[in-house]
Image (cartoon, rainbow, N blue to C red):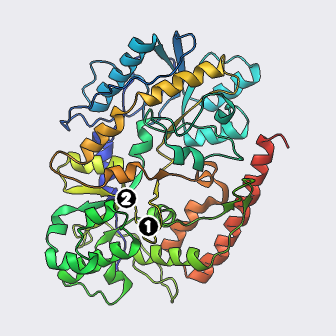
Amino acid sequence: MRKAWSLKKIISIMLAVGAFVCISSCSSKTTSGDVDESEFSIATIDVIPSKDTDIPDIEVVEPTNFVILREYGVEDAFLSGGESQDMLGRAIFERNSNISKEYGITFSEVVENDIVERVRADYLSGKPEYDMLILSARSAAVLITEGCLADLESIAGFDAAKPGYYEDVISSLSIGGKSYLAAGDATPSLLLSADTVLLNTDLLAKLGEATEMLYTNGKGVIPLAKEGGFTYDVMMSFSKAFSSLNGVDTATPSGESAAIRADSDDALALYLSGGGVFYQKDGLTDIPFEVEFDGEIEDIYYSVMKIFGFDPRTDAVEFEEENESDSLAGFSLFSVASIAELLALRNEGSPFLPLPMPKMSLEGNYICNVDLSRAAFTAIPAKAPDRERSLAVMNVIYAMSGSIPKIIAESCEPQGEEGAFDVIYQSLSSDILLLMGYGDIESLMTSAVKEQMKSNIFGDRFAERSTVAVKALSILSDKLNGK
């Protein structure tokens, strides 16, 4: 049996020494306590940032000082000094300078260790001294539950389809028709946290034209992905072809998937990318309801588990994570990783290009899940001094942050190399269950891989999670709607 091993053990070390992007703040700031905040940079990647030339036609009321309360330790900071040597830092400084020039807005930032306690106290007093928040997903979940964040949908001028926002992410994190978090280009960690598939182009070249055509009807894997054709089956077909080429027995699921590397913690992202759900919402009332583990949902689970090298419809044996001494460590044609991890590998000269997460069928949409444990969002406090003004400035910030995804794209796909970054960028999403933690579905999917869980056992546990999720979401929705 093949044991699934991921590049993430190596990547995490690389990130720790400086390959993950984190933009340092040069503004005046106050902190509570002494905390060692790690800073990362991709300064060694020599790419010239693209310039924003289009100034959005947005009315900003009373363009004066705009105060941002930022959580200490989130992956990105809003302000950056002009002396910054990394590309994102320079782009953010340029964006802020352009906003100041065009709208007369100046920014200041306050950094808080315990942002939940600070915002909670300011909500009770009704006198927050800041206009906007930048905070982690976990902190946001607590503040949403306690009613401390403004419903953006209730503020005139908010539209998740406006430039710079990630509409699908905002929509997927809405509760009862209310949106409390803004997501998009203004907070680079969201894009950097997106789950993707990394394609090893050096290994792909060894497949040869004939083998490649055999499984893709004449289309290379990157063009195929761009046209919406990167499915579980295609991923398995390429893996099987590469494994056979290298003398691996592909008569079993573990042999078929031998050239795919994914960690057990990637199981949920793969399940979501295939269209897997744990609950559904009524299209008219937005009321959540349970779903049955059968039909397409069971098929998605089956396809995901085959990527990990076993058939969940047959007897299973215990799963173990592979270690770094695995003889197949350099054998991976596909690896599941984040955009940030891809940048780390590119920084080391590794031959990887990005692909979207695989989907179940050609008719489906790509879904690249955002890892909420790494992502930061913006929000407006429920009792902001002037919510309309705060939203107007937020709209400007997002609209003028277009250089950020361009720089990340150019870093993922240097000149002369082409992956499917644009497809990934258009496919970002998440799930309200991941934000709130209801049902603990992440641990269920991880356990499914580690235990090589049979379909009938997973189905029973799936039903439990679906029931918990629906009840929890219904209670929260009623609370936020004053019922």
Is 101 above or below relative to 12? above
Q: Residue at x 14, y 72 (%)?
A: 206
Quick one: SS at disc 2? loop
Relative height, residue 6 to residue 24 (above, below) = below
Q: Is residue 246 above or below residue 77?
A: below
Residue drawn at x 28%, y 28% as measured from the top left: 51
Give the quadrant of residue 354: bottom left
Judged from the image, the secondary structure of the residue bearing numbered disc 1 is loop
Q: Residues within 10 Å of mark 2 (few under 14, many from 20)?
A: many
Instruction: Work out whether residue 146 or residue 96 is closer to the camera in this orientation and state it.
Output: 96
Q: Quadrant of the image for the N terminus? A: bottom left
Report the side of 289 relative to 458 (left or right).
right
Can you give x and y, in whole percent of width and height, for residue 332 in the image? Answer: 26, 68
Inspect the image, locate mark 1, and give the three-letter code of the amino acid beneath it.
Lys
Query: How many labels were placed on the picture?
Result: 2
- The numbered mark at residue 359 is 1
Q: Position of residue 144 (x, y in %)?
A: 68, 38
Residue 399 or residue 255, whichever sits in front:
399
- Residue lying farthest right? 483
Q: Nearer the viewer, residue 43 or 416?
A: 416
Instruction: Point out which mark residue 356 bears.
Output: 2
Residues marked 2 and 1 touching at CB (< 8 Å): yes
In the rendered image, which quarter is residue 93 located in?
Answer: top left
* Left or right placement of residue 126 versus residue 409 in this view: right
Q: Quick one: 440 or 289, which is closer to the camera?
A: 289
